[in-house]
Amino acid sequence: MFIVPILEHLARRRLNSVGVRSRYAYTRGGRLHYYEALNPAAKGPPIVIFHGFGASATSFGRVIAALRPHSPRILAPDTPGHGFSPAPHQRLTLSDLYDGLDEVLQRELSEPAIVVGNSLGGAMAVRFADRNPDKIRGVVLSSPAGAPLPEAHFRELVDSFRPRGFVDASRLIARLYDQPPWFRAIVAPDLLRHFRQPHFRHLLETFSQEESLQPEELASIRAPTLILWGRGERLLPGQSLDFFRTHLPAQGRIEEPEGFGHCPNLDRPRQLARRIAEFAQST
């Protein structure tokens, strides 16, 4: 019996019960699920949230709930093959993930938004901001991936998402948090099953440094930009932060919060939401 899928369905039901709607959009790559939270009484820009590789928008559920008083509209899509968005085929590529997000947001975003991205979602947020400056009010990147790396570090990072057994899966879970969670042994079998799905295996095979962010993509962002790189980061190598520090535009800033790991939406959701809200108000 697998626990995480059950918890994810229960979390979606909980979000739906408090007014965060599950919606589906039909794209060229298939059906794509996204959460939409509306609060007409709130002032400020819309907020868009991009999740990381192998994760889902549901993992930001507590962040979405905490942000609702601060934004009139929050959108959090599941990329193809993630969360409640089915994989349209078993040979997904990174371009398929980005294109699905882009197609939905071209329809749904009618005004500039704060775009938030974690991990691979951070790289996609940079790419979206570079290609759609008219849709960007600000950018918040939480442990963004996508930086060019020495080949050995790149291969180690990709291979960490190919757990060979229980120990590897448990180690990967621990690397996502500021402190290794007590339940990692319970959900490790789920993680093994998760990344053995055909579309994830193919995605990992297609990962290449040719897909890495280019300095000009980051430098092109003219909107205020905030990078949150927690002191508990254990997944991405230090060269990743060096890349962003070197090429971040002058209006950008980097903060290194205590207690934030690779996925602060999981271990520090209220603190992450508070910082996003403060940033949105400042823009």
Image: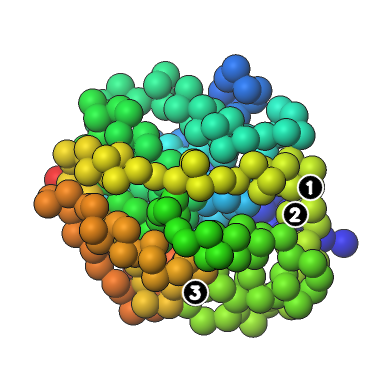
Q: Is residue 131 left or right of residue 278?
A: right
Q: Are marks 1 and 2 in contact (CB under 8 Å)?
A: yes
Furthest-front residue in this view:
151
Q: Which mark is residue 194?
A: 2
Give the image location of residue 254, x and y in percent: 24, 63
Residue density around tag 1, few if under 14, some if 14–19, many if 20 or more, within 10 Å: few
When the figure is inspected, residue 244 is found, relative to residue 283, above or below; the finding is below
Give the image location of residue 61, x and y in percent: 51, 53
Give the image location of residue 226, x and y in percent: 24, 55
Identify the secondary structure beneath mark 2.
Answer: helix
Q: Amino acid at mark 3?
A: Arg
Identify the secondary structure beneath mark 3.
Answer: loop
N-term-proximal mark, 3 vs 2 = 2
Say which residue appears at 22% left-offset and 40% top-offset: 221
Q: CA distance from mark 1 to mark 2?
A: 6 Å
Q: Which mark is residue 197?
A: 1
Q: CA distance from mark 3 to mark 2?
A: 21 Å
Say which residue appears at 29% left-offset and 72% top-offset: 256
Kindly identify which residue carries mark 3. 234
Q: Amino acid at mark 1?
A: Gln
Furthest-right residue in this view:
1
Give the image location of residue 238, x and y in percent: 39, 70
Which quadrant, please, contains the C terminus? Answer: top left
The quarter of the picture where residue 190 lies is bottom right
The quarter of the picture where residue 216 lies is top left
Which quadrant, please, contains the N terminus? Answer: bottom right
The quarter of the picture where residue 48 lies is top left
